[in-house]
Image (cartoon, helix red, strand yellow):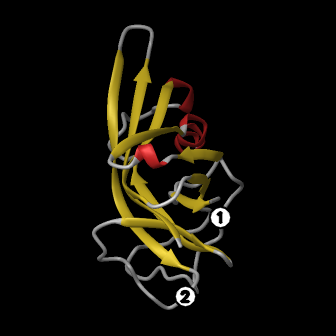
Amino acid sequence: MKSLLLLAALSLFIGSVTSTHAATAVVTDDTTVSIALPRSSYRSAPTLNVATALSGVSKRVYIQFDLSALPGGLSGAKIEKATLRLFCSNVKKAGNISIAPVAAAWNEETLIGAKQPTVGETEVAGVTINLADQRRWITVDLTSLVRDWVDGILPNHGIVITPDF
């Protein structure tokens, strides 16, 4: 099995003509789901695990962010940059991950592999994770997705990270 253990943070840079502000979105829910063990719950696991097996995707990661602390009346156009930072605590084999928005509500208390929410189209594909990324942060640009959440084009039900190893 090829796997990757992750920690996550979403940072936003909000700009205007007169100033620029930085904000960090709070993670409200995060969990791993196993396709191989569809009734298993990982809600209390200390890390998030993305993994594949010879038969295909084995584990996915779901992360949801609270954007309510952003300034009122904010439009997506004011968001200059939104980046997801992932800490790769353990990389067993190099590969790629993809990130897609989750299209339906979920929470870490009840999410299992057998009952996953609907997922939208892939937002970012082919994010390379190398062996050298172990114990390092990688950054993924989610500006377009966060703008869509802020503007109400897509509901903010978080993201799913899927391995493409």
Q: Position of residue 156 (x, y in %)?
A: 52, 54
Which image quadrant for residue 36? bottom right
Where is residue 53 drawn, in percent x and y?
60, 75
Q: Quadrant of the C terminus?
A: bottom right
x and y percentages locating residue 99 in the rendered image: 59, 53
Query: Residue lying furthest right in this view?
Result: 121
The numbered dot on residue 82 is none
Is disc 1 surrounded by few (<14), some (14 to 19) or many (20+) residues within 10 Å?
some
Q: Kindly give the residue lying farthest to the top in the view shown.
A: 18
- Pointer 2: what residue? 38
Mark 2 secondary-structure assignment: loop
Under circle 1, the secondary element is: loop
What percent of the width, then of the height, locates residue 51? 52, 68
Q: Would you say the residues marked 2 and 1 are in contact, meaning their CB atoms lie under 8 Å apart?
A: no
Closer to us: 97 or 19: 97
Rendered residue at 53%/73% (across/down) = 1
Tag nearer the camera, 2 or 1: 2
* Residue at figure coordinates x 47%, y 34% from the top left: 82
Residue picked out by circle 1: 119
Q: Nearer the viewer, residue 136 or 38?
A: 136
When the figure is inspected, residue 133 is found, relative to residue 58, above or below; the finding is: above
* Residue at image coords 59%, 45%: 127
Disc count in the image? 2
Whether residue 104 is situated above or below residue 121 in the rendered picture: below
Whichever of labels 2 and 1 marks the residue nearer the N terminus, that label is: 2
Location of residue 45 by image quarter: bottom left
Query: Which residue lies at the image location 43% right of the left edge and 19% below the top edge?
Result: 15
For badge 1, the amino acid type reads: Val
Going by the numbered disc 2, the residue's amino acid type is: Pro
Q: Relative to 44, is 141 above or below?
A: above
